[in-house]
Image: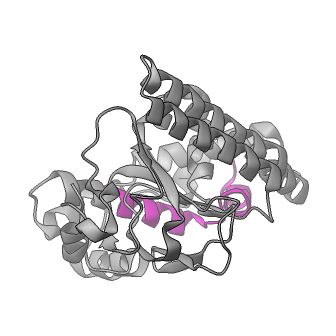
Amino acid sequence: MNSPDRHGTYENLLYNGLINVIDPRDFPRSFPMHWHKHVEMAVLPEDARADRPSVLRVNQTEYRLSPGDVLFIWPGEVHETVSNEGGQMMGLQFSAVTLNELPDFTPFIHLFRTFHHIRRTDAPELVQRMHIHIRHILSVQNNNGTFAGVESLICLYEMFMDFGTHIKNHVMKDTQQRTSGSARTFEKIGAACSYITDNCDRELTLESAADQIGFSACYFSRIFKQVTSYNFVEYLTLQRIKRAQVLLADSDKTITEISYQAGFKSISTFNRVFRQYRGCSPSEYRKYYLR
């Protein structure tokens, strides 16, 4: 699926290399609802005109970007470009495997994905560094040197190192102070998240997840909510939705088969919950997939 000519071509995802740079000239003025398996970043330059609306919708939430803001769109999230007046936005697209395959990023993956809109006014130092990395990647890609792909990838990793450091020094530290939790506690919650994700198609309970990391059910329930912002049932349901998304994209199975393989007990529950989380039915979601 290609985007209309007048809107640019960035959403065709038919690119070579590890990172797709979306130049402002190619970022569409608008683009209909869709989703894909790549991580996408929409960026409004710091010198952009504030009177030109830059609006995107992700998972039913509308985000209005101000100059300098960065918006993350994670794999499988239904999104659309509502307005990009003046053609000011730029961005990046890259495979989620780029992050998932590195053990150092593993403890941060579920935390990265809790972020969407990063405002320059809220995290000026982080946003400034992100912009430096993004401009560098754009420059490297435009120059197309011998090792452009490697240099761009190194820069991407440096950007996520800065992102992870910000989370560790600010978000996790603040949460630790509120919960009196230790770094080891956060590591265990991260392990619990991985356990839930890997086994979401099975019959899981709060007690079994707590037992997996050696916590009492009561303590686990409280800390899990404070660290992830989800209660156990919400997080388990979200992982089942994500499992279903993969199956909807990569298989010809029926919606009913997918619902059971993702861990749902009935097709009616699956349809209801999927629409609640993604704003569309599973069959509609399958149609929105941008290959």
Relative to residue 203, is residue 49 depicted above or below? below
**Image location of residue 33, percent across then percent down:** 33, 74
Q: Which of 279 and 41 lies nearest the eye of the viewer?
A: 41
Residue 274 lies in quadrant: bottom left
When asked about the image quadrant of residue 184, the answer is top right
**The stretch drawn in magenta includes residue 179:** no
150 sits to left or right of 35: right
Q: Residue placed at 38% from the left, 33% from the top?
A: 18
Residue lying at 70% horizontally and 59% vertically, measured from the top left: 46
- Membership of 227 in magenta stretch: yes
Give the magenta range. 215-243
Task: State the colouring used for the structure image.
Answer: one colour
Judge from the rendering whether residue 107 lies leftward or rightward of residue 74; answer left or right: right
In the visual, does 201 lie left or right of 207? left
For the N terminus, give its image quadrant: bottom left
The answer to which of 6 and 11 lies nearer the viewer is 6
The residue sitting at 46% across, 30% down in the picture is 143
Q: In the picture, residue 198 is in which quadrant?
A: top left
The location of residue 213, given as percent across then percent down, is 62, 41
Q: Assign the magenta stretch its main secondary structure.
A: helix
Q: Quadrant of the C terminus?
A: bottom left
Residue 1: tell me if it is visible: yes
Is residue 214 something one can see in this rendering? Answer: no
Residue 241 image offset from top left, x and y in percent: 36, 64
Q: Nearer the viewer, residue 121 or 232?
A: 121
